[in-house]
Amino acid sequence: MKCYTGPAGKADFLKAPEGLPVIIDVLRASSTIIVALASGARKVIPVEDEAEALRLGRELGAITIGERQGIKIKGFDHGNSPTELMASDLKGRTVVITTTNGTRVMVEGGIIASTLNAGAVADRIRSQPHAYLLASGSPLKSDEDLCAALLIENIAGRINGGENPERAVQAATESLEGKALLEGIRGSASGRKLTAYGSGRDVEMICTEINTYPLIPVYRNGAITLL
């Protein structure tokens, strides 16, 4: 996959959009969005501005998720934490989310990717002639997203080689390369920062629960729903 990073990369992609955009902020927006939808949320609305997110949340009676620099924003229902959401009843609810990076790289038709749905995404992209990665951070701060993307590519290659998706996920995860990529996520600047901030449970979940949620969320018309 060709990689575009951050809002500038998004702008470059939109100059000549082609193929399937894969949006990834593995630590943690993509992972939080996946868990929200897996927990029954009807849709997730990503918003760049925190004041607009709060306003929209009130207007829609929505659950609000807000984070800046790894910290929950005051006044929001939840921080950007997949493990926190697992204990919440989101069935039928609308979720509004704003985060430091992930909510700034949404593009129409893009699928949301993480380690948590790596197998499903791999199965989806393997039949696409072109898939493009839109990573959340700057070119110097997206190591964890690139590691997750390489893991997804590894799985896709194994599926194309004849392995069933479940076996491909297991084999890729247990391979030396897969273990190194997951350690790359854990040991990235973002991973270390989140652990230092007390969010190590999120990092461990993201690095161990590979394809636990085999879903394909897609961003269309301003909201993320399941394909």
Image (tube, rainbow, N blue to C red):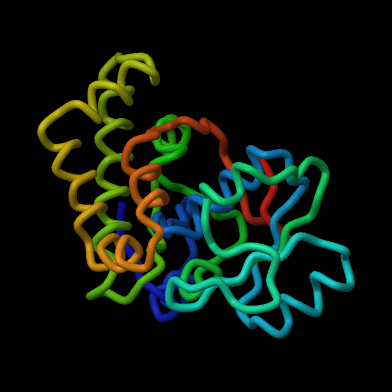
Count of numbered tags? 0
**Left or right: where 191 falls relative to 40:** left
Tell me the residue at 25%/35% (across/down): 154
Q: On screen, 212 above or below 67?
A: above
Residue 227 visible in the snapshot: no
Q: Report whether residue 196 is seen.
A: yes
Q: Which of these two is toward me, 16 or 68? A: 68
* Left or right: 107 as drawn, with respect to 21: right
**Residue 208: percent from left, percent from top:** 33, 36
Q: Which of 105 and 20 is in front in this view?
A: 105
9 or 26, which is in the foreground?
26
Q: In terms of image quadrants, where is residue 192? A: bottom left
Q: Position of residue 102 (x, y in %)?
A: 49, 67
Q: Residue at x 48, y 75 (%)?
A: 100
Vertical arrangement, residue 174 with respect to residue 221, above or below: above
Give residue 189's quadrant in the image. Answer: bottom left
Please state which of residues 213 and 162 is positioned toward the viewer in this rendering. Answer: 213
Q: Is residue 35 left or right of residue 220?
A: left
113 is higher (above) or lower (below) than 78: above
Expressed as whole percent of the image width and height from the top left, the position of residue 88 reads 69, 46
- Quadrant of the image containing the C terminus: top right
Residue ID at (32%, 16%)? 167
Is residue 177 toward the left or the right of residue 5 in the image? left
Residue 114 sits above or below residue 133 on the image: above
Q: Position of residue 108 (x, y in %)?
A: 61, 61
The furthest residue to the front:
198
At a point 65% along the width and 81% down the height, the residue shown is 50
